[in-house]
Image: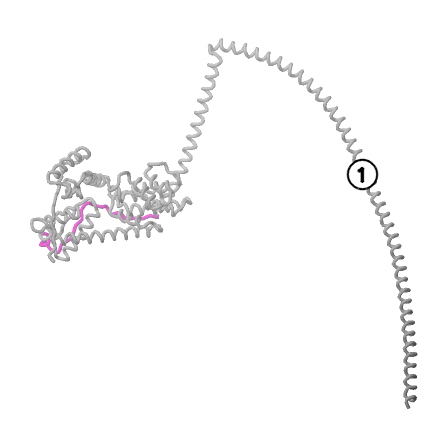
Amino acid sequence: MAVDIIVPIVTGLGCLAIGGAAGYAYRRNIAEAKTAKAEEAVKQMLDDAQKRAESLKKETIIEAKEEIYRLKSENERENKERRTELQRTERRLIQHEEQLEKKTVAVEQREEAVSKKEKETDKREAEVQELYEQQLHELERISNLTSEEAKQMIISNVEHEAMHDAAVMLREIEAKTKEEADAKARNIISLAIQRCASDHVAETTVSVVSLPNDEMKGRIIGREGRNIRTLENATGVELIIDDTPEAVILSGFDPVRREVARIAIERLVVDGRIHPARIEEMVEKARRDVDNEIREAGEQAAFETGIHGLHHELIKLLGRLKYRTSYGQNVLKHSIEVANLAGMMAAEIGANITLAKRAGLLHDIGKAIDHEVEGSHTQIGADIAKKYRENNQVIHAIMAHHGDIEPNTVEAVLVQAADAISAARPGARRETLENYIKRIEKLEEIANSFEGVDKSFAMQAGREVRIIVKPESVSDVDAVVIARNIVKRIESELEYPGQIKVNVIRETRAVEFAK
């Protein structure tokens, strides 16, 4: 049993060993075949690579030879071109040298000819100079004049003739230019005047206040004249109460004061309570109302002329011109008229219309405060315009409108012309009224110049100056001295008809309130 089992096992093992040896031998043969095949492929690849390398080497050598040949050919061509160019340059230089030699020869020949001509010329000049001197001596002998004297005579004659001809020509040019300029100016001015129509009301020095009845006159006068005295002292206007029925006349050179007095009296009449305290209250209210009217008048003037952007203080000063006259002509209306005329003329000649109108409106602004500030109204106006930052050309036009300085802009000339047109038209001004107002203003100016004077008023058409002094700084004795000194100043500085009464008032008030 055991043998039967062992024999198959041994047989199986033997077969297995034989099969393994056979498989090993087979795999070895296959591996050797693959190795041989791979070696053959590698050898073939090496052979191909060597062939390609040899082929590439040959191609590279051929290309290098071709490039060397090309470069050599180019070099030879360039050398040939350079040799050709050098030959051409050499030929040109040879030609230039030949030409220079020819020119040199020609110049030498010309120099010889010029030298000969110079010698001949010098000889002839000497002969001419000798003849000239002989003739000059002969002329001096004949005319009894030296050469310098004759020369001066000729120069003088020529100069005289030239000046005469120039003067004639200048006169003709001036006449023609003036004729053309006059015609053009007349045309422009006539057009401006035709387009500017303004009414004119002559200012006077009196105002009339209507009363409801003659009994009111007594109430205005008051007990022992205290009401009328208070009115006159508060307003600086003289009240004339005469036989004129139901009317009181206010006399004063300052239209603003007269307007304040008129408004105050009318309100007192309506109110019915007329006594010193109420009078002072009404005068103060009237003064405020007049200030408002002044501002509104300035705004209206700016609106009428189309001027915008004026400083509010300039507006007020413009409004004050409503109550200011120049030779009887209302200054505010005159300023509006000048602005319109200047603007129209500027439009005709193509100048700056806005600038011309602005300068025309402000040209007399200095007259609003000329009685308060030293200097001419042109300088005062220019200072005011500078203060409120007006345009430099406007300031220049203000200073130049009366010829104080030479106008250097077209607009300044137009303002100057418009001012003359407005003032020169018939009925615009009255010389006598202006002289009277200046005299009255000078009276008050003299009075106000003394220390201790509170305020002063020229009354009765300048025949009386009423001066109110400060009681705390001026005694009764000082008041007499001030009156005498004012009289001496008036006598030395003013010309006036008749006599002027100087009335110095020193009043002390004691006011208490019962509570």
Where 21 sits versus 381, above or below? below
On the picture, is 112 further left or further right than 255?
right
Question: What's under tag 1, amino acid-wise?
Answer: Glu
Residue 214 is covered by the magenta coloring: yes
Q: Which residue is drawn at 26% across and 48% down?
A: 320
224 or 461: nearer the viewer = 224
Residue 146 is covered by the magenta coloring: no
Q: Residue furthest left?
A: 224
Q: Which residue is drawn at 16% across and 36% down?
A: 486
- Numbered range of the magenta stretch: 195-217
428 or 353: nearer the viewer = 353
Q: Where is residue 324 in the image (x, y as percent from the top left)?
A: 25, 45
Q: What element carries label 1?
A: helix
**Residue 343 visible:** yes
450 or 217: nearer the viewer = 450
Density class for disc 1 (Cα within 10 Å; few <14, some 14-19, many ≥20) is few
The residue that label 1 is drawn on is 81
**Quadrant of the frame with the N terminus:** bottom right
**Residue 468 visible:** no
Q: Position of residue 292 (x, y in %)?
A: 25, 53
Q: Which residue is drawn at 23% across and 52% down?
A: 290
Where 301 sits versus 478, above or below? below
Q: Quadrant of residue 325?
A: top left
On the picture, is 239 further left or further right than 113?
left
